[in-house]
Amino acid sequence: MAHGSLINTLYDQSDAAHGAKHEWKVGDGATYCGWSDRNAYTVIAVTRCSITLRRDKATRADKNGMSDAQSYTFEPDPEGRVITARRTKRGWRVGGQRGAAIIPGRDEFYDYSF
């Protein structure tokens, strides 16, 4: 199993994860789908086979506490972590074929159950 949450597994198996119709551009928002968390990034460089992303600053905008109902605001973070995703047969991946998926659009989620 590549993910620990149903939502991340569905995102990973969607057409969006496979980059079927998305043309990445510098400045686009992207989501890194990890085990059960999701993190927002901004695309900072694009080549034919890779995209480089920088972690955005995500600020919790709701008051729901340790809940699955979470909403965030995003802003660029010049000091954010930089990662590179490569195009594979299974979509855009960080860390190879079984690595974390990158999908278009910014999303953030913290799984409090771990």
Image (spheres, rainbow, N blue to C red):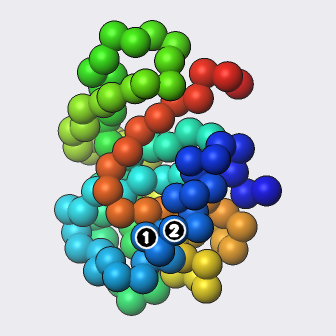
Instruction: State the residue at coordinates (34%, 10%).
Output: 63
Element carrying mark 1: loop
Q: In which quarter of the image is residue 46?
A: bottom left
Evaluate whether residue 74 shows in this view: yes
| Image quarter in which the N terminus is found | bottom right
From the top left corner, tell me how far across and down residue 49 is, in percent. Answer: 46, 86
Q: How crowded is mark 2: few (under 14 residues within 10 Å), some or many (20 or more)?
A: some
From the top left corner, tell me how far across and down residue 22 is, in percent. Answer: 32, 77
Evaluate whether residue 84 shows in this view: no
**Which kind of residue does numbered mark 1 sit on?**
Ala
- Numbered badge on residue 61: none
**Which kind of residue does numbered mark 2 sit on?**
Ser
Judging by the rendered image, the residue that carries numbered circle 1 is: 16
In 3D space, how far apart are the residues under numbered discs 2 and 1 (Cα atoms)? 5 Å
Q: How crowded is mark 1: few (under 14 residues within 10 Å), some or many (20 or more)?
A: some
| Image quarter in which the C terminus is found | top right
- Describe residue 28's horizontal placement relative to residue 110 as left or right: left
Judging by the rendered image, the residue that carries numbered circle 2 is: 14
- Total label count? 2
Residue 69 versus residue 58: which sits nearer the camera? 69
From the top left corner, tell me how far across and down residue 57 is, in percent. Answer: 31, 35
Please determine whether, in this image, residue 105 is positioned above or below residue 51.
Answer: above
Instruction: State the residue at coordinates (59%, 82%).
Output: 88
Element carrying mark 2: loop
For the residues bearing labels 2 and 1, Cβ distance under 8 angstroms:
yes
Q: Quadrant of residue 24?
A: bottom left
Residue at the farthest right position: 1
Instruction: State the residue at coordinates (69%, 74%).
Output: 97
